[in-house]
Amino acid sequence: MAVGDIQKTVGRNLRAYRIERDLSQEVFAEVLGVHRTYMGGVERGERDLTLKSMERMAEKLEMEVLELMKPHK
């Protein structure tokens, strides 16, 4: 696994979650309690997320943090 693969996977998973629920990036950012531009960086895999921030996001989405890190097809 290359450096940055997990953050890209988390970003893809969050984007897929948001799109499945027909949420704008702005609304999704509000749900997660983060700024819209930060959310954009997360979705693009450009932001280094701490475990604590991933735990908070997973909790707000009512899912296990490992689900955010799992590669999906």
Image (tube, helix red, strand yellow):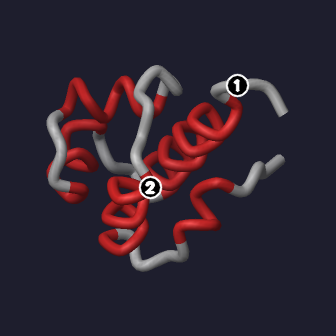
Q: How many marks?
A: 2
Residue at image location 21% in from the left, 58% down from the top:
31
Rate crowding at label 1 as few (under 14), some (14 to 19) or many (20 or more) other CA atoms within 10 Å.
Answer: few
Residue 9 x %, y %: 65, 40
Question: Based on the displayed image, in which of its 4 quarters is residue 60 positioned?
Answer: bottom left
Please name the amino acid that badge 2 sits on. Leu
For the N terminus, the image quarter is: top right
For marks 1 and 2 on the same chain, the one whose residue lies earlier in the sequence: 1
Which residue occupies the foreground of this view, 21 or 17?
17
Relative placement, left or right, of 50 versus 39 is right
Q: Nearer the viewer, residue 29 or 47?
A: 47
Tell me if residue 65 comes above or below residue 16 in the rendering: below
The front one of 60 and 73 is: 60
Query: Percent position (x, y) of residue 55?
Result: 40, 65
Which residue, given by chain and number where applicable, does mark 1 sit on? Answer: 3
Q: Secondary structure at mark 2?
A: helix
Q: Amino acid at mark 1?
A: Val
Residues packed near mark 2 inside 10 Å, few (<14), some (14 to 19) or many (20 plus): few
Image coordinates of residue 18 in percent, x first then y, are 43, 50
Task: Find disc 2 in the rendering and name its residue.
Answer: 51
Which numbered tag is attached to residue 17?
none
Eyeballing the image, is 22 above or below 63? Answer: above
Question: Circles 1 and 2: CB distance less than 8 Å?
Answer: no
Helix, strand or loop status at disc 1: loop
Q: Name the residue located 76 percent from the left edge and 49 percent from the top edge.
A: 71
User: For the residues marked 1 and 2, what is the alpha-carbon distance in whole angstroms?
Assistant: 16 Å
Tell me what residue is drawn at x 36 percent, y 74 percent: 59
Residue 27 vertical placement versus 4 (above, below): below
Q: Position of residue 57 (x, y in %)?
A: 35, 60
